[in-house]
Image (cartoon, rainbow, N blue to C red):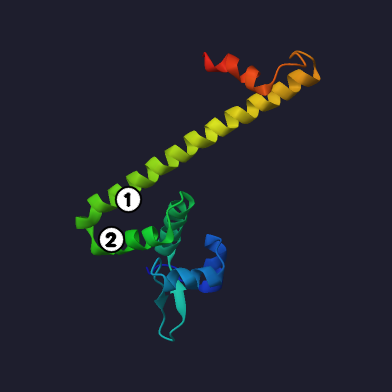
Amino acid sequence: MADKQYRIGEFSKLVGLSTYTLRYYEDQGLIVSQRDENGVRYYTENDIRWVGFILHLKGTGLRLNDLKRYVRLRAEGDRTIPERRDMLQKTKDDAEADIAELQMHLKVLSRKIDWYDGKVDHTIDDSESFHDYLQQFNDK
């Protein structure tokens, strides 16, 4: 039984990308459509999974050039697994660093909100600055 074939409009809806974006991704070599006997572009279930993976990588902050490199390496086969693995590890490390930075920013925002709440409900002295308020957390 042959894979179900999706024309670009239907495929666009399935993967949540515009037809313009799909064509752009094709031009960039990120995805490869197939053509039927009339030359009409179509995609398969495997393409749905592949686009999902590409979008996951893109969502991690992987730049377009790195995505293109990954796709090229994948097309070369298993001998490029170590290089692809290294790319993914670097992307993971970068994402973890971004998360740590965001967590630090959230902590400062939470403390600033707590400080404002303390000023409003008078549990923090009117003369205590935010800088002084933060000092109590530096010792912990």
Tell me if label 2 and label 1 are in contact, CB under 8 Å.
yes
**Can the viewer see residue 6?**
no
Mark 2 belongs to which amino acid? Leu
Q: Earlier in the sequence, mark 2 or mark 1?
A: 2
* Foreground pick, 47 / 64: 64
Q: How many marks?
A: 2
Locate residue 12, reporting x and y percent. Answer: 54, 67
At which x and y percent is residue 72? 30, 64
Q: Which residue is painted at 43% across and 74% down in the image?
A: 27
Whether residue 115 appears in this view of the structure is: yes
- Label 2 or label 1, whichever lies nearer to me, is 1
Q: Is residue 62 above or below residue 99?
A: below
- How far is mark 2 from mark 1, CA to CA? 11 Å
**Location of the N terminus (image quadrant):** bottom left
20 left or right of 28 in image: right
Which residue appears at 77% of the width and 16% of the height?
126
Q: Which mark is residue 73?
A: 2
Seen at 53% across and 36% down, the residue is 102
Q: Position of residue 11 (x, y in %)?
A: 52, 67
Q: Secondary structure at mark 1?
A: helix
Instruction: Name the residue carrying label 1.
Output: 87
Asked which secondary structure carries label 2, the reply is: helix
